Amino acid sequence: MALHKPYLDVPGTTIFDADQSRKGYWLNQFCMSLMKADNRTRFKADEDAYLAEWPMSDEQRAAVRARDLNWMMRTGGNIYFLSKLGATDGLSFQQMAGSMTGKTEAEYRAMMIAGGRSPEGNRIVGEQGDAQGAASQSAAWQAWQAQHREPALAAQVQAAHAAQGAAGQARVTASVYSSHVPAIGAAVDHGRTGEPYWAPMFKGFERSKQWMRENTPDVIFLVYNDHATNFDLGIIPTFAIGTAAEFEPADEGYGPRPVPRVMGHPQLASHIAQSVIQQDFDLTIVNELRVDHGLTVPLNLMFGSPAAWPCKVIPFAVNVVQYPVPSGRRCFALGQAIRRAIESYDEPLKVQVWGTGGMSHQLQGPRAGLINAAWDNRFLDRLIADPAELAQMPHIDYVREAGSEGIELVMWLIARGAMADVAGGAKPTVAHRFFHVPASNTAVGHLILENHA
Ligand code: DHB
Ligand code: FE
């Protein structure tokens, strides 16, 4: 099922959605750079040289040189970003907007003084209003099109849809739950997994690695928390989805971990973002993200140390650092929205949803070192058997019983919400369950649930 885009038939209008944003990413970032006086000076001194520094398409560069805003929008530009280019040229918003309408500056100004353009006849493509028809085009855009004959866009889109529709939909195949202690990453990186302290913990994941070899997905939707690594106190998103093509391992102060870079899935991530936001969850879309131990350690536990991760990963970061953090109930409902989003994607991808962090641990204050193995195991029981009831548990119970950092466990409810039984389907199968104390300050918990439609 394609995403609901009711705005495509509004005449003379381009809505800046995830698809447009992906197309226009570097064009818009170039425009942003013009907010610095030094960059404006360099751009004005040698446009071609400055544009060459940005990985835009040739067409986007040509559109910028032509100062054709309709053309820039067509290639993914957004008016608020493009306005930085207009401002660099000394234009007002009225001059910029007017330049896209086919009117002269004076005509456009007169139209606005006379009360502005009427919506009558301009609500839907094909009506008789004055904003119908093709966008005005500069001579440069026309020349470009004459040189680069594009196959009809509608035909291309139709063909792509037909091909994908025939092939099937994406499916959530399993959910995986695991702690993500940085010391586990250090043990892997320094070849210490066989030491007496670590061997029993890694042994618990032997079966998981075998299972992963037999059940490698195409994509992992990996729910984790950023530990004051990519996000500082400048911006604190509650839910952030990584939509980039690649994510570098972060330097958390010890140097970046020597693990492969993580390859994303921009198309599926944008689809999930759009679908989940349309289901009334407010996600932050992150196009630049460095991933910390919260994401890389579970990959090691499940895959070992390959030269490249064997599948794509969509990072999904949840704020559990600064209160208020999202409730278990909201995380559980979000998981359900994520499953609907994944299973409405028109490509037969196998997708696993992972929940990481926990189990009981407290990293701060005189109560540091708190471990509540009985509570953790009861959490695993409830997560398997009655997650809807578990999702009602308030934060204070996590903190009191599982330690202040045990709050990371709310993220497991996102992965659990993505299982089919929550929406009336069959119960998942428990493929593996493991619990071990300690890894550093933490109780390590682990679960693999196979999904059945
Ligand atoms: C530890 C555990 C964590 O989940 C974390 O993010 C940092 C440290 C620990 O047990 O040391
Ligand atoms: Fe953590």
Image (cartoon, rainbow, N blue to C red):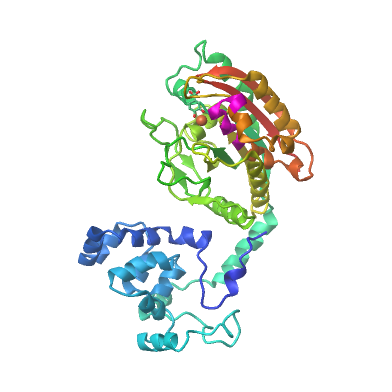
Specify the farthest residue to the top: 196
Please state the horizontal and vertical placement of residue 232, each as a whole percent of the image.
41, 41
> Would residue 114 be seen by someone viewing this image from the given angle?
yes
Q: Is residue 407 magenta?
A: yes
Q: Nearer the viewer, residue 235 or 434?
A: 235
The residue that appears at 68% across and 24% down in the rendered structure is: 433
Is 416 displayed left or right of 145 in the figure? right
Q: Is residue 376 left or right of residue 189?
A: right
Lateral position of residue 407 relative to residue 84, left or right: right
Residue at image position (36%, 88%) is 106
Q: Residue 3 is drawn in which quadrant?
A: bottom right
Q: Quadrant of residue 401?
A: top right
Task: Decide whether residue 12 is among the magenta residues.
Answer: no
Magenta: main secondary structure? helix
Answer above or below: position of 1 versus 295.
below
Where in the figure is residue 380, as x and y percent of width and height? 68, 27
Give the residues in magenta: 400-412
203 or 230: nearer the viewer: 230
Q: Position of residue 383 (x, y in %)?
A: 70, 32
Q: Classify the position of the N terminus by image quarter.
A: bottom right
Give the quarter of the figure containing the C terminus. top right
Q: Nearer the viewer, residue 416 or 235?
A: 235
Q: Residue at position x 67%, y 47% from top?
A: 339
Across and down, in percent, residue 5 comes to 61, 65
How many numbered tags mark residues here? 0
Q: Is residue 174 above or below residue 87?
A: above
Query: Relative to 219, does residue 150 appear above or below in the rendering?
Result: below
Q: Is residue 213 visible?
A: no
Q: Is residue 99 above or below residue 430?
A: below
